[in-house]
Image: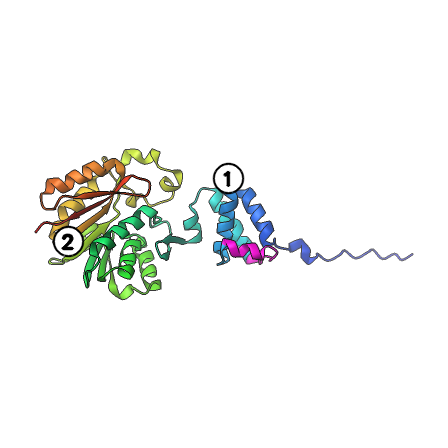
């Protein structure tokens, strides 16, 4: 009998194996269960599809594919971020808007369907026009201005935001959508970045319209993660809207359109701002897909 001690077996590659797509999705669903409930499996699927630059349907055909170490590490970090409440769009760094996939981060609001409808109303108003120039106040990711440049009869847009971080995001999106040469990005609060004598056929904005005291009524994902400067207007929620309504006539062409997204809670006050100015034609208040009064449209008189 030999006195040699048996050699310790070397670690098997299986000891460090990463999960397959199927296994990763199962673990992802368990990780998100406490936060996302019935949506946990769906969210785990969409996160992995985004990470792998795939689609949920395509992943079904790749269930036995093993993730790389890097993919598995990133996916675990994404799951942890989602479990902590971070919106999926910020985790992936992308948000869908109309025909676009836009870059987003926490310096910009996540674009929403209501804002897509605002774009649609502007497109309806300017149908048949050509060579129009528009102004987007509080552009954020650039979603509104970029969509109107791509889909409408606009030759140029000026897009303003008080946040340098937001403008950086908009700049990347403008470059990726190939409208950078037609989009003039400027930093400033509302109209302060404009030059004397500038005029626009359309001024559009999704401004801050939440009253300071209503923060507690917001979903946690909005209140805790999206930029406060883009959400809160002041004590009543109509402060920024009022500033826009008051100043826009100095920059609108006669008959030009002011198009605003508003909260249903301030819709009546916003309409009254338009009427009180006596410089606009009778405003129109349109409903969003949920039947809420959300989209305010008014033409400048003259």
Q: How crowded is mark 1: few (under 14 residues within 10 Å), some or many (20 or more)?
A: few
Residue closest to the far front: 128
Q: Callout 2: few (<14), some (14-19), or many (20+) C-alpha neighbours within 10 Å?
A: many
Residue sitting farthest toward the left = 302
> Considering the numbered disc 1 on the image, is that residue within a helix, a strand or a loop?
helix
33 over 153 or under it: above or below: above
Q: Can residue 104 be seen in this view?
A: no
Q: Disc number at residue 38?
A: 1
* Quarter occupied by residue 268: top left
What is the magenta range? 56-70
Q: Position of residue 83 (x, y in %)?
A: 49, 42
Residue 134 image offset from top left, x and y in percent: 20, 57
Q: In this view, does 232 lie above or below 186?
A: above
Residue at far right of view: 1
Q: Name the residue under label 2.
A: 256
Q: Is the magenta stretch mostly helix, strand or loop?
A: helix
**At which x and y percent is residue 221?**
40, 41
Q: Marks 2 and 1, Cα distance to the nearest angstrom?
A: 47 Å
Query: How is colour applied across the structure in the image?
Result: rainbow
- Quarter of the rendering occupied by the N terminus: bottom right
Q: Residue 193 lies in what quarter of the image?
A: bottom left
Horizontal side of residue 6 vs 235, given as left or right: right
Task: Determine the secondary structure under disc 2.
Answer: strand
Quarter of the figure with residue 86: top left
């Amino acid at each position: 009998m030999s006195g040699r001690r048996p050699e310790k077996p070397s670690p098997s590659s299986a000891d460090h194996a990463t999960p397959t797509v199927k296994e990763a999705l199962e673990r992802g669903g368990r990780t998100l269960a406490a936060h996302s409930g019935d949506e946990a499996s769906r969210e785990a699927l969409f996160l992995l599809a985004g990470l792998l630059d795939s689609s949920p349907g395509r992943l079904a055909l790749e269930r036995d594919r093993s993730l790389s170490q890097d993919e598995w590490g990133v996916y675990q970090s994404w799951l942890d971020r989602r479990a902590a409440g971070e919106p999926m769009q910020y985790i992936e760094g992308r948000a869908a808007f109309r025909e676009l996939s836009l870059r987003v981060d926490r310096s910009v609001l996540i674009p929403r369907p209501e804002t897509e409808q605002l774009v649609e109303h502007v497109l309806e108003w300017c149908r048949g026009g050509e060579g129009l120039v528009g102004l987007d106040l509080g552009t954020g990711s650039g979603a509104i201005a970029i969509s109107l440049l791509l889909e409408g009869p606009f030759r140029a847009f000026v897009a303003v935001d008080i946040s340098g971080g937001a403008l950086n995001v908009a700049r990347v999106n403008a470059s990726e959508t190939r409208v950078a040469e037609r989009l003039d990005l400027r930093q400033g609060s509302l109209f302060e970045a404009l030059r004397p004598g500038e005029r626009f056929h359309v001024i559009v904005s999704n401004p801050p319209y939440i009253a300071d005291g209503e923060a507690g009524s917001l979903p946690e994902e909005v209140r805790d993660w999206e930029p406060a400067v883009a959400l809160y207007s002041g004590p009543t929620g109509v402060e920024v809207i009022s500033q826009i309504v008051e100043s826009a006539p100095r920059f609108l062409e006669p008959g030009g359109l002011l198009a605003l997204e508003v909260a249903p809670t301030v819709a009546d006050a916003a309409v009254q701002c338009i009427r009180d100015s006596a410089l606009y034609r009778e405003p129109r208040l349109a409903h969003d897909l949920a039947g809420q009064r959300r989209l305010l449209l008014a033409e400048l008189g003259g």
